[in-house]
Image (cartoon, helix red, strand yellow):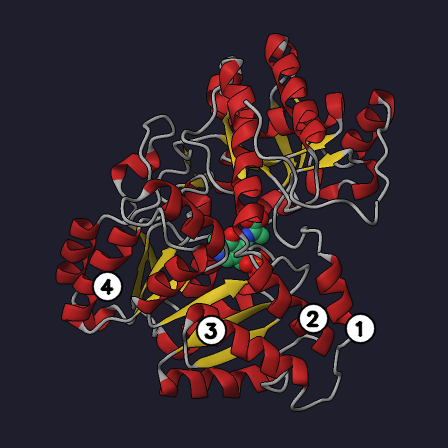
Amino acid sequence: MLFPAEPFKIKVVEPIRKTTREERDRLIRQAGYNVFNLPAESIYIDLLTDSGTSAMSDNQWAGLMLGDESYAGSRNYYHFEQTVREIFGFRHVIPTHQGRMAENLLFSVAVKPGDYVPNNIHFDTTRANVEHKGGIAVDLVIDEGRDPYVEHPFKGNIDVQKLERFIEEVGPERVPLAMLTVTNNSGGGQPVSMENVRQTKRLLERYGIPLIIDACRFAENCYFIKEREPGYERKTVAEIARELFGYADGCTMSAKKDGLVNIGGFLALNNEEWAEKATQLLILVEGFPTYGGLAGRDLEAMARGLREVLDEDYLRFRIGQVRYLGQLLLEAGIPIVRPVGGHAVYIDAKAFLPHIPQAQFPGQALVVALYREYGIRAVEIGSLMFARRDPKTGQTIYPELELVRLAIPRRVYTTMHMNYVAESIIDLYRRRDQVRGLRIVYEAPVLRHFTARLEEVG
Ligand code: PLI
């Protein structure tokens, strides 16, 4: 099966070099078996993240030259504001340097200590920002969304009944807002259906609770709606996006994903009071409201990227490329999360390396092997990231899943690169018995996966 060929040709190339196994063996030891500590130049195919790693178009690069770097009132801000209003439909548009700052502003103005913020599944920075304000982040994805193998077209949906019970239990006055992350990154890049957004809105409206969308991968989500949800086949992705955001009261956005830029984000809101308070805070921590921590040229690239991402030839290719990689792996019997999500393929490392116990980080062991053997960088989403010590018993609580995410940067790699990745993983699967577990030799008290150092066991 071949996905639609690239709907672009390549004007500028960035050389990548395949290092030798000996070099990589030395580098990964020096890095303490943590791929965050590797020099990126030693990586052949970098699938660490799809965030900020997109290739911009010639149209976006041309836009950079039209950057108006005025401190206040840059023309690029007006272009950006108008673009966001047209696509998303919200009244107030607050630029930020990336997604987590939009989250920080939102929760700073909306969340009080002891408040609850439900979501399908919060991304790490979203959860951390809720907790930073003393709030409690709650994940209420449907049960199917937690099972890596059950097929469901919209595994990112929130469980509306659970949400209702939850609001009744804690009281609506303790829920200043609810969120939906589209697509659901922490649950495998799975989409949320329009019906689910509509039902969520209907429920929240009864309690007067605003709905805020985490819009990072909104275009990919809307493309899945077009492909999978009856009644949307003939609508454009732009029309679908307009309807989806029409049910919401605002959104946080990391434009480093579906904004097709290397830096940028925004908070968009209808609520005048929240917008005013967020803008006051923006001036304190980011900059004047018409640049929000970005250069004028960045705003221009973002405005152009937000339109380009709605191009359906692009989206067909994009979703198709990720699915193609997943399909190659599935055909070879590699255990991956199904169905394949929008921006990444997630390998089930527990099933891939059944001989490595969770205490020895099977996900990280797989990440290390992919780098050392083939020069591919992936990221562990398992025990290294999430295992916690129970403060009462001192016992380690392991996450249910040990996943390895292969996030595909947008417009960066070709079909042959995908073949290389698939063949490498299939090769490793054949000799998976040789992969060894790891133990931690250094860890920081919070977000340890970024800086931990490990060594091989045995
Ligand atoms: O990295 P930021 O601050 O621009 O965006 C934060 C963020 C918010 N929501 C979601 C769903 C994300 O996926 C997200 C960032 N994701 C990263 C960095 C990733 O590697 O998936």
Comes first in the chain, label 4 or label 2: 4
* SS at mark 4 in the image: helix
* 163 vs 144: above or below: below
Q: Quadrant of residue 227?
A: top left
Dot 2 amino acid type: Asp
Q: CA distance from mark 1 to mark 3?
A: 24 Å
Dot 4 amino acid type: Lys
- Mark nearest the camera among 3 and 2 is 3
According to the image, label 1 marks what residue? 65
* SS at mark 3 in the image: helix
According to the image, label 3 marks what residue? 86
Q: Is residue 344 visible?
A: yes
According to the image, label 2 marks what residue? 298
Q: Residue furthest bottom?
A: 72
Dot 1 amino acid type: Met
User: Is the residue at mark 3 in contact range of ligand 1, meaning its CB lies under 8 Å from it?
Assistant: no
Q: Residue at x 44, y 86 (%)?
A: 277
According to the image, label 4 marks what residue? 201
- Mark nearest the camera among 1 and 4 is 1
Comes first in the chain, label 1 or label 3: 1
- State the residue in front, 346 or 224: 224
- State the residue in front, 393 or 58: 58
Q: Residue at x 12, y 61 (%)?
A: 168
Rendered-image quadrant of the N terminus:
top right
Q: Is residue 445 visible?
A: no
Residue 258, given in percent of the width and then of the height, sits at 55, 56
* 180 vs 415: above or below: below
- Mark nearest the camera among 4 and 3 is 3
